[in-house]
Image (cartoon, grey):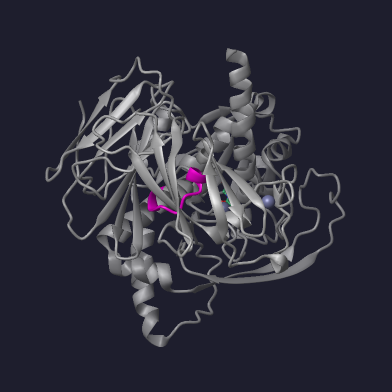
Amino acid sequence: MPIVTFPKDKRCRNFAWVYETTARRSFYVQIFLRSRLRIMQTSVRTSFSKILRGKAIVNQALVFKEKKFRSLSIRTYQGGTSANYEFAKFLNSRLQFKKRCISSRQPQSVQRVHLDDGSQILSAELLLEKENVMVKMVNQGKYLPGSNTDVENQQFPFVWLRDNCQCPKCFHSEAFSRTMQMLDFDINCRPASLKVSEDKTSITFFWQDGHESTFKADWLSERAFTPRARALRLIDYRGNRVLWDARDFKRINEDESAQSWRFSYSDIMSKDSSLLAWLEYLETMGVALVVGSNPSNGQLRRLAHRASFVRRTHYGELFSVRAKDEPSNLAYTSEKLQLHTDLPYYEYKPGVNMLQCLVQWKGPGGENHLVDSFAVAELMRHEHPNEYNILSTTLVDWADIGQEPEGVDDDSGVHEGKRERRAFHSIYRAPVICEDREGYIVRVNVSQPQRDSHFCVKLSQVSTWYAAFNLFAQLLHSPRYCVTYKLKPGEILTFDNLRVCHGRGAYGSSEGISESLERHVKGAYMDWDEIRSRIRTLRKSVSLENESKVS
Ligand code: OGA
Ligand code: ZN
Ligand code: ZN
């Protein structure tokens, strides 16, 4: 049984969450170290065999149950530093939990457990002099092992309840939209009374102006303002993320027992479940290889359309990466391309990069380099906090100047051969490591060619920034993190352009490249907004499809 050790750190208040990975073959533990205002996140993947990296005190028990994948329970002991994973303990249980998490604030006991399938409202207190209503949720006696309480107190502000009334007057159920006018809204609204339904699964508020609003307990619970409900929502919002290094990559590339990063083009095009599997993997790992496309008939565009839309940039919709005369970008030479992310000078930097190999250089060179820059950034956060701080706060000027070349090899048919030559000059200022307000890394910008000579910072910040950036670059290029893969014709390298830095080895011989076709990669971008939306809708339709197959 694998043992997990979490170094003790009294300064942190921690959360830990367990949920299934998209691959559905393993479980995924996320540990949040909450120190001051920041939530740091460490991901720990658990396959059934092996686990763990990460620093945390998890002074609590976690229990997780998933109907298809047997059970997992993780337990850490109060005051101790060990945890264990037990599998198949609840194999015969019928309970079906979608997602489980338990706050780790209270050592020794598992508190505030809410079970999606069995929640009921036990009681609701109406305190008219206050702004909130208190709703106590209880599961139907289906306690998780180790729990010593079955009640969760949730408070909902009246103003929020009234605003979110789901009745046909206030909410358009087909458009999924609130119809109530803000200008007509009484922010001081109060209920005159409330009633819990007989079966205790819903609650109705009778407002002082005569309006009524009924809410299901589950619906309310998912929107609770408790730290746990908010953190759960954040996990859904952010999606899965599993950081990797070179060793992990070797496994997904070579180890047949691991979840491979390869997805079949024809499966993706013909089955929604395969499309979903590819997109979820891309979201989780940041990199996925689509194999078996035909290099010669526009399948890259079809793949993009299957997932979302092609995102157009000043290089066109589809762009050809090969050695060209008068290159508008260093990529259009046969030189080495250092690790970079594409287009850092866009405020809306394209989220996903797709590189379809049409023709590969036969000699040495022309291979791609890949790094999970978020993994490197997390390492820096822990081991080089000063440098991390500099890179995540200093605004850098990114820029691209040039001309969109004529007659770019674009198979859209619309622009082919008659594209206008249009000059561009893009600038965007952003740190190398971009965090959201909670300290969660959301984007990395790296590009030597496209870092502007304008560096709009104070004099005193310049040399320390270079030292920090140089360290980051060293770590990115180190064999611990950087991997190499040489694409074969028909393979499409798809990766998260906000996260994965990529590069290319120089190619060509001493005589140069006689034929421009000797290495030819076709590229296109998509945006995460569209893909995430697609993932959400596919999850619904694919699970409905599976259910109908079972029944
Ligand atoms: C690029 C790029 C990689 C390659 O065009 O930005 O990274 O394999 N190309 O040529
Ligand atoms: Zn209403
Ligand atoms: Zn690139």
The vertical placement of 216 against 105, above or below, is above
Q: Position of residue 480 (x, y in %)?
A: 32, 46
The residue lying toward the viewer, choosing from 518 and 545, is 545
208 left or right of 249 in image: right
For the point 35% across and 52% down, the residue is: 41
The vertical placement of 1 against 532, above or below, is above
Q: Residue furthest left?
A: 79
For the point 53% across and 44% down, the residue is: 195
Screen quadrant of the N terminus = top left
406 left or right of 220 in image: right
Specify start and end residues of the magenta stretch as a single range.
220-228
The residue lying toward the viewer, choosing from 8 and 425, is 8
Let me know if residue 221 is in the magenta part.
yes
Res. 484 image quadrant: top left
The residue lying toward the viewer, choosing from 192 and 303, is 192
The vertical placement of 432 against 475, above or below, is below
**Res 322 seen here:** no
Q: Position of residue 512 (x, y in %)?
A: 59, 49
**Res 102 seen here:** yes
Res. 272 image quadrant: top right
Let me know if residue 530 is in the magenta part.
no
Q: Residue furthest bottom?
A: 459
For the point 34% across and 41% down, the residue is: 151
Q: Position of residue 174 (x, y in %)?
A: 75, 42
Screen quadrant of the C terminus = top right
Q: Position of residue 517 (x, y in %)?
A: 68, 42
